[in-house]
C-alpha cells in the first residue's frame, strides 16, 4: 500500500485536534453568565415546579410597564423569560 493514505490520516488527525482545541479555547474565552437567575422567594417559588413555557405565561403579569416590577428599557422580548433567567 502506498504511503499517501497514512499521511492523509495523520493530516486529518492533526486537523481534528486543532479544530477541537480551537473550539475549546473559544468556549473558555466566553464571558461569564451575568443574567439574574429566577429568584427563590415566595412570589416565584411556584414557578420553579412548572414547565418553562407554562411558567412564562405568568411573567408579564408583574413584569410590564405598569406592573410591580417593570422591565428596564431595552430589555429583550418578554415571551422567553426562562431562556435567559434560568432556574437554579
Image: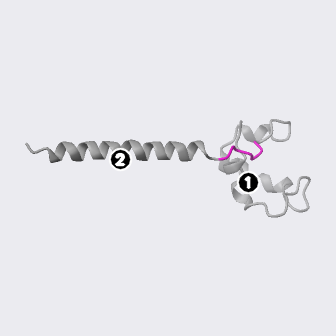
Q: What element carries label 1?
A: loop
Which residue occupies 29% across, 46% down?
12
Is residue 87 located in the magenta-colored stretch of the structure?
Answer: no
Crowding at dot 2, Cα within 10 Å, few <14 / some 14-19 / many 20+, comes out as few
Picture layout, residue 73 above or below residue 58: below
* Residue 35 among those drawn in magenta: yes
From the viewer's perspective, is 9 left or right of 48? left
Q: Nearer the viewer, residue 43 or 28?
A: 28
Per the rendered image, the range of residues in magenta is 31-37
- Which corner quadrant holds the N terminus? top left
User: Residue 30 vs residue 1: left or right?
Assistant: right
Please name the predominant secondary structure of the magenta segment in the image: loop
Q: Mark 1 points at which residue?
A: 57
User: Can you give x and y, in whole percent of width and height, for residue 3 in the image?
Assistant: 14, 44
> Image quadrant of residue 6?
top left
Q: Distance between the residues labelled 2 and 1?
A: 47 Å
Q: Quadrant of the C terminus?
A: top right
Q: Give me the residue at 77% from left, 52% from top.
A: 58
For marks 2 and 1 on the same chain, the one whose residue lies earlier in the sequence:
2
**The one of 56 and 69 positioned closer to us in this rendering:** 69
Q: Residue at 58% of width from left, 42% of height from top?
A: 28
Q: Which residue matches tag 2?
A: 15
18 vs 64: above or below = above
Q: Do the residues labelled 2 and 1 touch (CB within 8 Å)?
A: no
Amino acid at each position: 500500500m502506498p504511503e499517501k493514505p497514512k499521511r492523509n490520516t495523520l493530516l486529518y488527525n492533526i486537523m481534528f485536534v486543532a479544530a477541537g482545541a480551537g473550539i475549546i479555547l473559544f468556549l473558555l474565552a466566553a464571558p461569564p453568565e451575568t443574567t439574574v437567575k429566577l429568584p427563590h422567594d415566595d412570589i416565584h417559588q411556584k414557578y420553579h415546579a412548572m414547565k418553562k413555557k407554562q411558567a412564562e405565561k405568568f411573567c408579564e403579569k408583574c413584569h410590564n410597564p405598569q406592573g410591580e416590577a417593570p422591565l428596564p428599557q431595552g430589555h429583550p422580548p418578554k415571551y422567553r423569560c426562562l431562556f435567559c433567567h434560568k432556574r437554579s
